[in-house]
Amino acid sequence: MERGVYFDGWYRGQHCYHPSLPARRLNWVEDLERYHGTMLVWSALGGGSVSLPYLEHEAYGKVAMRDRMYGVLNDSEFIAECDRRGIKVFGVVFEAQGWEFPAELDEDETEVLALNEVRGVGSPGWLGLREFGQDRYPEIWPSVSTYFPEGLRNSRGEVVTDLIEECASRALDGSLHRARWVECDDRDQQCYYMDRNNPVWREYLKAVIRIQIDAGVHGVQLDEASTPLMTLQYGGCFCHDCMSGFREHLSSLTGPLPEALRGEDLATFDYGAFLRARGEDPLRSGASTPLIAEYFTFQRKAITATFLELADYVRTYATSRGRDVLLTGNLYNVFPYYNGVIEHVDIVVTEMRNVGYLQPEWFRYVVGIARGKEVLVVENPYGGVIPRLLRRLDRGEAYDMVRLLAYEASAMGANMTAPYGSWMGSEIEDSFSLPDELALEIQSFLKQIDPLLSTVSGNDVAVLYDVASNVRLALEREVFADNRVNDTNDEVVAPFWALTANLGRHGVPFDVVAVNDDVVPSWHLTAEHLTRYSVVMLPGAADLPDWAVTELDKYKAGGGTVIIGSQGTDPAQGAAADAELLQVARAASRVQVGSVTPVGVNTHELGGGRVAVHLVNYDLDHERGVVRTARDLRIRLRDADGGQLTVTRPDGPTLVLTPRNVKGAWEVVLPVLGAYAVVEVGRA
């Protein structure tokens, strides 16, 4: 499996300035090799959202002799050095960002004296997408016609003269949205929230993709893959293309229209005008805003269609250049509205929304939704533990907390990328890297156990995740939250998350199986997908389409067991139902771990009749930042072959244990568990 590195390479003690990443250095590549990295995300060629010439300078710009002394590389050289070492570099396309930076220029406007961090020299000005699109500085950047000889025309046939004004998303009052999560407030920067529903912006992004592929990237990462759906944190997008697209969506509906549309002329309907006339604003009313559910559905369809257009372009253009290039995105927290997008990536890359130290339910969810594709996870600095963890690491503390983050992901079937100058948001002037010896320790162990990792589990319990009800819950719980805070409305009960947290935190191994709705083209569950499971659990309040109910009936007719969980309305009844579900799930599992210590359990199918049981120790002392050692874990294995068990650990030598047969199953006692261990078992 891939061992990812979150490789922004931003500096310690300084802002992480999107979108351009610092110049890469040869000794950084040597670090990546020492860390056994195989894939880099957010790692190169991010400057396309400043301008295309800026991006080309990142790729091929001449490196000064003084910088050569310290091994500085341009990005195409960096990619080539990584390629020599078998490390895949993904170029990052910041799809939602359109930048304007303060600049200082010489009198002739032929040289940039300062950019972003200005110093009071020369003539003040701005450099960014607007100036590029208007050929404002012909002695600094080539003309936009170099890249678009026929010019750019919008969906109305008009010639585009201002990329920002044309392509930025718009608020209900018509003003331009800003991407506040990447703007540094103490700098005079402007980052506009760009709209992928605008065909002009998609053409621009295709030019970014061409430059990245020509520079040698092994993969393209489409960041902010849900743009412009994420503008709901600012109230939604009401630009021309979103309004015309929503109008077409409403016109395509069959059956009775929503009551709010009574008397409306769909041929001329404008959602923004509709809301303004009623004094409604999604920023105030959120999920209760008239027609917001249909607007959300429209944007789900739109982000899937436009992502697919760019994904197809990546592959088609790479083929035309005689290359095979991988594709991923940033699927953020893998909200249910990514269910169509996920079909089109080669590797699933996520930005964990709220990073914590005990989240088996989230990892198992993401791995389940990925359906066999590898999952790489990066941390998010907003709304989680990372800022405090960084300070504790600086004091030489909390190494076990990092180990737990990495090893929980591994146990649950994903890869937590190693941070190397990774993003700390727009407010904290710092970046996140692990202490060298800790990074080397974790990455070396992950390489050691690579033969014991798999994207396929051997679990006996499945929990169904129905997209339809969880889309509605996402709209009520998370979608309107500012992503610099990442709040969740926990007053809205989410039965799936309650059930899976209960299983995962009580050591019951389980899989998540998606039940997609019919909004976007996506994979459909069949009874055959469920036959390997002894028990299938359906969280309360699920909303299954008719075809999925039919498949569940087929599964039951074949001898499978389906259990429906609590609706979550009565806390006492819910707790009792959850306890019963936990008991049933534990009894159905061929792997059972008994311990007074909380332990996460998952199984990885290895082939050849072998399975790896992954054990992660959740007994974290938060105050001291250490995982307490667990002792005498009793592991009960049904369907094992009774042979010796091999235990691989990061904090001790390999153990060989001999099980004994107890009442028809094989039992063994693991004498000690630090943060993590992997037990290799032969199946009967």
Image: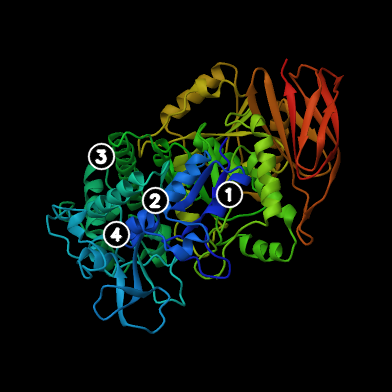
Residue 31 relative to residue 183: left or right? right
Which circle's residue, 3 or 4, is located before the other in the chain?
Answer: 4
Tell me the SS state at disc 4.
helix
- Crowding near the residue tagged with mark 2, few <14, some 14–19, many ≥20 C-alpha atoms within 10 Å: many
Q: Nearer the viewer, mark 4 or mark 1?
A: 1
At horizontal 55% and vertical 41% (from top left) the residue drawn is 38
Rendered location of residue 484, percent (x, y): 50, 65
Spatial CA span between label 1 and label 3: 59 Å
Q: Amino acid at mark 1?
A: Glu
Spatial CA span between label 2 and label 1: 34 Å
According to the picture, the residue beneath numbered tag 2 turns out to be: 226
Residue 363 relative to residue 156: left or right? right
According to the picture, the residue beneath numbered tag 1 turns out to be: 30
At horizontal 74% and vertical 24% (from top left) the residue drawn is 681
Residues at badges 4 and 1 in contact (C-beta under 8 Å)? Answer: no
Viewer-closest of 116 and 503:
116
According to the picture, the residue beneath numbered tag 4 turns out to be: 53
Spatial CA span between label 2 and label 4: 26 Å
According to the picture, the residue beneath numbered tag 3 turns out to be: 254
Colour logic: rainbow
